C-alpha cells in the first residue's frame, strides 16, 4: 500500500513494467508501484542503475526484477516480452517512460539527433504498447500509461525532435485507447511540466526564477507528483478514464 501525497491503492498480485526505470521519473514510478504491492519489472539499458532501483523497491518491502534492454530494438523488446510471458503469464500495468533529449535548434539538428530521440522516445513506446496490448487484450484487463510531456502539447524551442516524439505519444495513446477500450484496457498519457531534476537544476537560479513565474503553483513539480498520478491511473479507481492526457505541470498550460 502507498500513502504518499495522500494516495492509497492496493496493486497486490499485479505485474507492472516500467521503462526508463533506472533514474528520474521512471525510478520514482517503479518505486511507488512496488510500494503499492505490484511486482515491478524494471527496464532500461543500464543494468547497474537498474540494480539501484530494484534495491530501493525491495528496501521498501516490494518486489522487483531488473530487465536490461535496448528499448528501441525490436529484437530486444520481443525477447523481453517472451521472457515475461513465460515467467509471469501476464502483464497488468505498463509505464512507457523511457526517453532522451538531444536539444538544439532545428537548422543545426543532425539526422542522428532526430533519429535517436524518435527511436528511444516514440518507437520504443510503439514497440512496448504493441507487445503489452497483445497480453492485455487476451486477459481483458490492463493499464497502459505513456509518459509524454507538456512539450508535446505546446512545443519548446530547441526541442523539435523531443516535442515531436512526445506529441506522437499522445496520438498513439488516444488511438490505442479507442482500439482497446472494449477489452477493459485503459490507455492514458501523463504530461509533466518542469520537474525537479539534475536537468532543471542545470538551468541555474535565475532561469528557474523565470520558469516559476510561468507556473501558477509557483514551484517546480517533483518526481513524486508524477508518480502519484501514474499510480492513480494504474489503479482500479481509474477504470473509466482512457484516452486522456493528464498534465502534471502546476497549471503552466492552463
Image (spheres, rainbow, N blue to C red):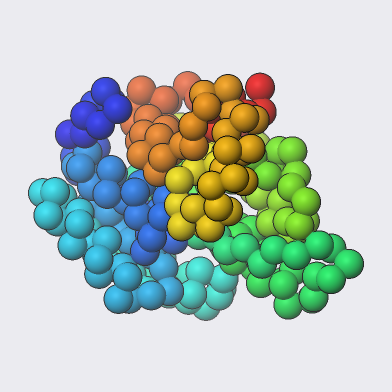
Q: Is residue 208 above or below residue 50?
A: above
Q: Quadrant of residue 7?
A: top left
Outermost residue, right side: 107
Residue depicted at 59% across the width and 45% down the height: 206
**Residue at 20%, 57% in the rendered image:** 56
Q: Which percent across, then down, holds residue 214?
A: 65, 30
Q: Say whether residue 4 is visible.
A: yes
Q: Name the foreground residue: 180 vs 72.
A: 72
Give percent across and percent down for residue 55.
18, 62
Q: Nearer the viewer, residue 210 or 138?
A: 210
> Would residue 242 appear left or right of 24 to someone viewing this image?
right
| Image coords of residue 230 (percent x, y) | 41, 37
Q: Is residue 90 visible?
A: no
* 167 vs 242, nearest the viewer: 167
**Which residue is nearer to you in this view: 194 or 147?**
194
- Judge whether 165 appears above or below 9 on screen: below
Going 57% across and 33% down the picture, which residue do you hit? 212
Quarter the N terminus occupies = top left
How many marks are shown on the rendered structure?
0
Q: Quadrant of the C terminus?
A: top right
Taking the spot 45% from the left edge, 52% from the top edge, the residue there is 197
Q: Quadrant of residue 114?
A: bottom right
Residue 213 x/y as whole percent: 62, 30
Amino acid at each position: 500500500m502507498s500513502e504518499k501525497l495522500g494516495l492509497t491503492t492496493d496493486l497486490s498480485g499485479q505485474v507492472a513494467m516500467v521503462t526508463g526505470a533506472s533514474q528520474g521519473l521512471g525510478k520514482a514510478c517503479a518505486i511507488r508501484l512496488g510500494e503499492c504491492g505490484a511486482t515491478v519489472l524494471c527496464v532500461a539499458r543500464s543494468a547497474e542503475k537498474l540494480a539501484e532501483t530494484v534495491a530501493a523497491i525491495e528496501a521498501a518491502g516490494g518486489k522487483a526484477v531488473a530487465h536490461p534492454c535496448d528499448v528501441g530494438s525490436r529484437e530486444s523488446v520481443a525477447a523481453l516480452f517472451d521472457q515475461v510471458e513465460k515467467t509471469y503469464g501476464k502483464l497488468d500495468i505498463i509505464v512507457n517512460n523511457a526517453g532522451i533529449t538531444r536539444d538544439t535548434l532545428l537548422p543545426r539538428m543532425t539526422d542522428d539527433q532526430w533519429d535517436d530521440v524518435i527511436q528511444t522516445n516514440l518507437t520504443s513506446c510503439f514497440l512496448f504498447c504493441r507487445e503489452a496490448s497483445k497480453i492485455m487484450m487476451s486477459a481483458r484487463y490492463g493499464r497502459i500509461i505513456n509518459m509524454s510531456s507538456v512539450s508535446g502539447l505546446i512545443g519548446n524551442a530547441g526541442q523539435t525532435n523531443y516535442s515531436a516524439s512526445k506529441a506522437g505519444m499522445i496520438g498513439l495513446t488516444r488511438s490505442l485507447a479507442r482500439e482497446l477500450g472494449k477489452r477493459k484496457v485503459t490507455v492514458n498519457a501523463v504530461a509533466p511540466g518542469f520537474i525537479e531534476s539534475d536537468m532543471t537544476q542545470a538551468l541555474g537560479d535565475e532561469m528557474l526564477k523565470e520558469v516559476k513565474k510561468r507556473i501558477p503553483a509557483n514551484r517546480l513539480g517533483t518526481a513524486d507528483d508524477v508518480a502519484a498520478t501514474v499510480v492513480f491511473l494504474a489503479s482500479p479507481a481509474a477504470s473509466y478514464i482512457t484516452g486522456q492526457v493528464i498534465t502534471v505541470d502546476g497549471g503552466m498550460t492552463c
